[in-house]
Amino acid sequence: MTWLGRRDHWVFAALGAVLLGYFLFPFVAFLGRTTASAPAEAVSPTAREAAVNSLVTAPVATAVATVFGVPLAYTLARTSFRGKRLVEALVVLPLVLPPVVAGAMLLTGIGRFTPVGGFLAGLGLGLTDSRAGIVLAQTFVAAPFVVITARAGFASVDRRLEQASRSMGYGRVATFWHVSLPLARGMVLAGVVLTFARAIGEFGATMMVAFNPRTMPTAIWVEFVSGGVDATVPLALALLAISLLVILATQRIGRAPTLAGW
C-alpha cells in the first residue's frame, strides 16, 4: 500500500471512528452514572412485574411472528404474483412507521370501542390494556424482521436442490420442511432473534395499546418521569443485558441482511 493509499485509509477510519465514538459515549456515560448512583438497591415490585410481562409477552409475539412470517417469507422468495410489490411494501411498512402511529392505527382496529375490540371485550377477551394487547403491538412492529430475514435466507437456497427434492416425489411442504428450511436455518434463526429483541424493546405502540400492564420499556418511562434517570437504572440494565445477548446470538447464528437486500 502506497503512502497515499495509507493516508486515504486513515481518512475513512477517522470518519468512522467519530460515529463509533458517538455510539460508545452514551453507554460509557450511563454505566458511569450507574456505578456512581449505586443501583443495587432493591428492585420495586412494579419493576419486577414489568420484567415478567416483557419476558412472557415477547416470546409469544416472536412465536406468532415466526409461525406466520416464515411461510410468508418463503412465498415471497419463491413465487411471483400480481401485487407482490404491494405485499412486500406492506411487510416493510411497520418498520418505517413511528411506533406511536402504529399504536394509534392498532387502536382504530382493535380498541375497546371498535366492532372487533368491543365484541371480544364482551366475551371477556379485551385486546387493550392486557397482555394480549401487548402481544398484538409487539407482533405488529417486530414481525417484519423475521419475514425480511427469512426471505433473504430462502432466496439464497439453490432452487435446483428443491427441484431435485420434487423430482424424488416430495411435495412442496415436504420439500420446504426437509430442504429449504434446514438450508436457510441460520437466517431464519437470526430473524427470530431480531424479532424477539424488537418485541421486548417495543415502547410506542405498546404504550398506546396497553399502557397497563406495563412492560419494561413503559415502566422505564414511568420511572423516568417520576424519579429521573437514576430510577430507570435497574430495568435499563436488564434491557441492556438482553440486547448484548441478542448481539452475541445474531453474530453466532450469522449476519442478518439489511433492508437494502429486500
Image (cartoon, grey):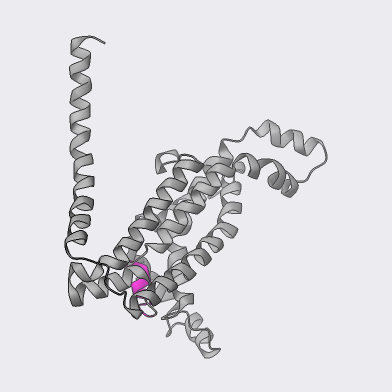
Residue 171 falls left or right of residue 240: right
Where in the figure is residue 140, as x and y percent of width and height?
A: 45, 63
Residue 236 falls left or right of residue 209: left
Nearer-the-camera pick, 43 or 155: 43
The residue positioned 21% from the left and 61% from the top of the image is 34
- Total labels: the figure holds 0
Where in the figure is residue 46, as x and y percent of width and height?
A: 34, 79
Nearer-the-camera pick, 250 or 192: 250
Nearer-the-camera pick, 1 or 28: 28
- The image quarter containing residue 42 is bottom left
Q: Is residue 232 above or below residue 166?
A: below
The residue at the far bottom in this view is: 122
Specify the segment rendered in magenta.
Answer: 204-212
Nearer-the-camera pick, 193 or 164: 193
Residue 246 falls left or right of residue 65: left
Q: Is residue 173 magenta?
A: no
The residue at the far right in this view is: 169
Q: Is residue 18 above or below residue 4?
A: below
Where in the figure is residue 230, as x and y percent of width and height?
A: 19, 68
- The image quarter containing residue 95 is bottom left
Q: Quadrant of the C terminus?
A: top left
The residue positioned 18% from the left and 75% from the top of the image is 227
Q: Quadrant of the N terminus?
A: top left
The residue positioned 43% from the left and 84% from the top of the image is 112
Where in the figure is residue 236, as x and y percent of width and height?
A: 30, 63
Q: Is residue 208 magenta?
A: yes
